[in-house]
Amino acid sequence: MDSRLLDLLVCPVCKGPLDYNRSVQELSCPRDLLAFPVRDGIPVMLVEQARDQGLNIHNSADSPSVSPAGNSTPDRGT
């Protein structure tokens, strides 16, 4: 992937910098713990396509979950 392109890209969630992992072809956001795939040299910057790199320790039956876009979703008690 072109390093000039990497300098221009930011995380679509927090607008922070991204780290490129060449061995797994991913752009990672250290703040949001999301990894965005790079397919055929093209970064896929869709939150829906991102891989969650962290453990969601706040997701319990008592607390609302948070989507990658940062929106709270109520627990429906399922």
Image: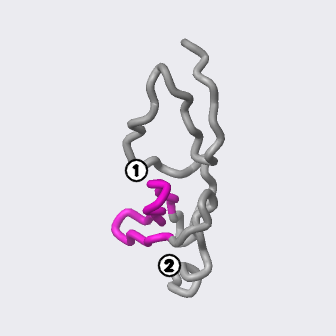
The disc placed on residue 11 is: none
Can you identify the residue that label 1 sits on?
Answer: 53
Can you identify the residue that label 2 sits on?
Answer: 1
- Name the residue at 37% across, 63% down: 24
- Name the residue at 43% across, 62% down: 30
Q: Quadrant of residue 10?
A: bottom right
- Name the residue at 46% across, 31% down: 59
Left or right: where does residue 77 sit relative to residue 54?
right
Q: Kindly state the secondary structure of the residue where label 2 is placed.
A: loop
Determine whether label 1 and label 2 are within 8 Å by CB: no
Provide residue 60's location: percent of width, then percent of height. 44, 25
Provide residue 66's location: percent of width, then percent of height. 57, 38
Provide residue 13's location: percent of width, then percent of height. 61, 57
Q: Earlier in the sequence, mark 1 or mark 2?
A: 2
| Amino acid at pointer 1 | Gln
> Which stretch did the figure color magenta?
18-37
Image quadrant holding the C terminus, namely: top right
Looking at the image, residue 46 lies above or below residue 56: below
- Name the residue at 43% across, 72% down: 20
| Amino acid at pointer 2 | Met
